[in-house]
Amino acid sequence: MSRVFWAIVGKELLSFIRSWQLVLVVLYSFTVNVYISGSGIEIKPRNVAVGYVDYTGGGMSQNILTRLHAPEFLPPRRFTSQEALSRAIYDKEIIVGIVFDPDFEKQWRQGHKSQINVLLDATAASQAYTTLGYLQNIVMGFSELDIPIEIASHKLFNENADNHTFMALTELLSITTMLTVILTAIVFVREKEQGTWDIMLLMPVNPKLIILAKSFSQILIVMGGIVISLGFIVLGIFSTPINGSFWAFLLLTFFYVWASAGIGLFIAAVARDIMQVAQLSILVMMPLIFLSGAWTPIYAMHPILRTVSLISPLRYYIEGTESIFYRGTEWIDLWPYFLGVISVGGIMYFIGFRKIGRLF
Amino acid sequence: MKARVIKAYILKELTELIRSRFIVMVYLMPTMILLLFGYGIRMEVLGARTLIIDNDRSLLSYRLISKFEHSKYFGVTVEPLSEAEALRRIKQAKTDVVIIIPESFEKRLLHAQTTQIGIFTDAAFPSRGITIETYVKGVILDAASGMNANLASGIIKINQRTLFNQAMRDEDAIVPGLIGLVLLVAPAILAALLIVKEKERGTIFNFYASALSKGEFLSAKLIPVFMLHSLNIFVLFLWAVYVFNVPFRGSFWLYWFASEIYLLISISIGLLISVITRTQIVAVVLTVIITIIPGFLYSGIIMPISSMSGMSQIEAHIFPVMYYNHILYDVFLIGEGLESDKTLRYLFILSFYAFVLLGLSRILLRKELK
């Protein structure tokens, strides 16, 4: 039995390596691609372009503006009139515009209520929100509020809220999902398309073994990519801290890749040719990736989607990975993630065995 | 040009596309993605799971807690836990933020002594962590300044006005960007297999042997997909305006025209991939890798391009999504239209892209055996 298993695995690996284009594409996605999104993408505000119109003649207003410094803000640009400022915001050159009214400083010195007018480009919603928070904090500092409350705030697990490691990791997880699903689905459908799949099933070998061997070969390829990506990019260049157990992560990854291969198997069972695989896998993967909690917390979603996301293995995997890498969660508290991933994988393989694993 | 031959070829392609039952996908996929994402992606953090440990249990601490309870940004539970237990909750990812109100909180406040409130935010998801932290601080400071009214003088108020999206609705900020993503991914993946499929099956020899020129062959591949997906431009528009209630302030003609050019680009990306790859599997993987993730990252949905740095900034300018999305946000939310030079410039850049991509496919396509 195991001889057949390894023969099939070997055959699939060989046909993978023979296609240099495919090897190149897979390597690119696991290395360069992960590096690019890790190095440049920041979700927290950075280099926010600020423009201002100052009708007061300096002093207090400049004092506030100097607090808007790098890396969060670009040096504020001066505009002579509010119209010029609005135009720049319309052209998306400026995200935040600040207007100081002529009597702003006078009001403030006399202890009256004074106000700053802030124009935000809300098409960049998350930037706008956080910039507003920054401004509020800065202004609060000037107001010399005499409150006897200190706030001791700690950001746990990631003190500087460093986004690079996080983005690199998220990208790696997304790539893993996409490649596993597509590679596995195509390995089966290619045979279906060429008609050799029926011959495989006619062989005196348990079809379950063939299915397991074929998907295992793709799991091996993806795991290889993950190890390369972890070694060179995630742990190498970005030196992501691992607060939990590395082996827990690898084990979880293995089960996750296995579950995604199950999804690929499911697609392969439904699709007839590669065109259909392409369409179906996009239809399945995009919700899987973007609604997994990597971009929006699950509890903030629409209730229906929240329920749907229960069947996404990526949901468990991402939370589990975050826990292992950043929160340093112990093995015992990781069981929900393992359970989630394994049960989704199990269901997918069960369906796959039934639908694709027999001739009639 | 042999118009009759091209017509026959187009007819053949169209029937092939329609016969594969998955023609439904051409219309189902964009709609489904738009609906799922439009409802699924939220930028503001609502209902952050907040655990408050109240060690004081006084009037003032209750008042502070009720401030949190009345905010839609927090989902509050108050439990008497030790710090270690609270930390474990965070590690199990059951809580996003822990707020600890110290003992004798009220007493010290009334005696005007400083007292310290502890906030522990889970920053495993950095941007969410920062947002939550800012919200919590805001609530506490707000509560504190409400406690004695005479503090109100001498405060600088921020009079904020948000442009284009007054209510700060997430739908308005996200849905136009999604159209740019969908119209990139769906046509590209449909077109990516058209030529490589023939290569793998060997039917490409029909083309080698036929009198059809390379340009004619490409247009015969391009036009059916183009026609089928053109309808999606209107479908997506209807979803955005009537289901998500995104305002439409610009000119519909500009939207239509820009979208058709953009469609041409995404189909050309697919065709180019189809021309350079040898097997269908590579074509699928390559299309997915270079459309989905960049389409999302560089669309301006999650971050404006101006805030990117280094390689990402360059890559964002390479992908056509950025230019199209600028126009999209303009027609939906801003309405400047062609009066703005930037829109006009971007429209030219888009046309240039379509031209270059199609030209490249034509150059790289072979019409004979190696």
Image (cartoon, helix red, strand yellow):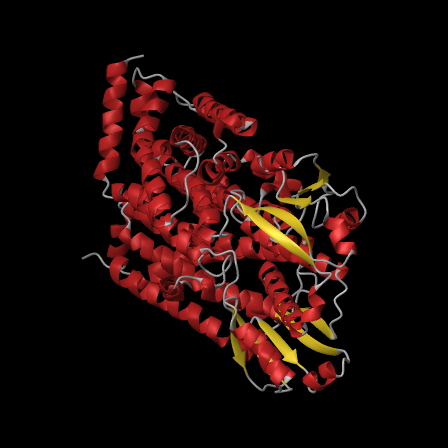
Asked if residue A228 can be seen in this view, the reply is: no
Please determine whether, in this image, residue A258 is positioned above or below residue A93.
Answer: below
Residue lying at the far left of the rendered structure: A360
Point out residue B272 in the picture as x, y percentages from the top left corner.
44, 30
Residue at 23% across, 28% down: B12
Quarter of the N terminus of chain A within the rendering: bottom left
Is residue B26 or residue B331 the one in the foreground?
B331
Quarter of the C terminus of chain A within the rendering: bottom left
Residue lying at the far top of the rendered structure: B1
Q: Position of B326 compared to A103: left or right?
A: left
Is residue B250 or residue B19 the one in the foreground?
B250
Choose top left, top right, bottom left or bottom right for residue A355: bottom left
Point out residue B145 in the picture as x, y percentages from the top left corner.
67, 69
Point out residue B335 in the picture as x, y percentages from the top left corner.
47, 35
Asked if residue B289 can be seen in this view, the reply is: yes
Please determine whether, in this image, residue A18 is positioned above or below residue A174.
Answer: above
Residue at 70% across, 36% down: A79
Residue at 67% across, 58% down: A136
Q: Position of A12 compared to A54: left or right?
A: left
Point out residue A213 in the picture as x, y percentages from the top left corner.
39, 59
Choose top left, top right, bottom left or bottom right for residue B86: bottom right
Residue lying at the far right of the rendered structure: A59
Choose top left, top right, bottom left or bottom right for residue A203: bottom left
Please determine whether, in this image, residue A299 is positioned above or below residue B84.
Answer: above
Please determine whether, in this image, residue A194 is positioned above or below residue B201.
Answer: below
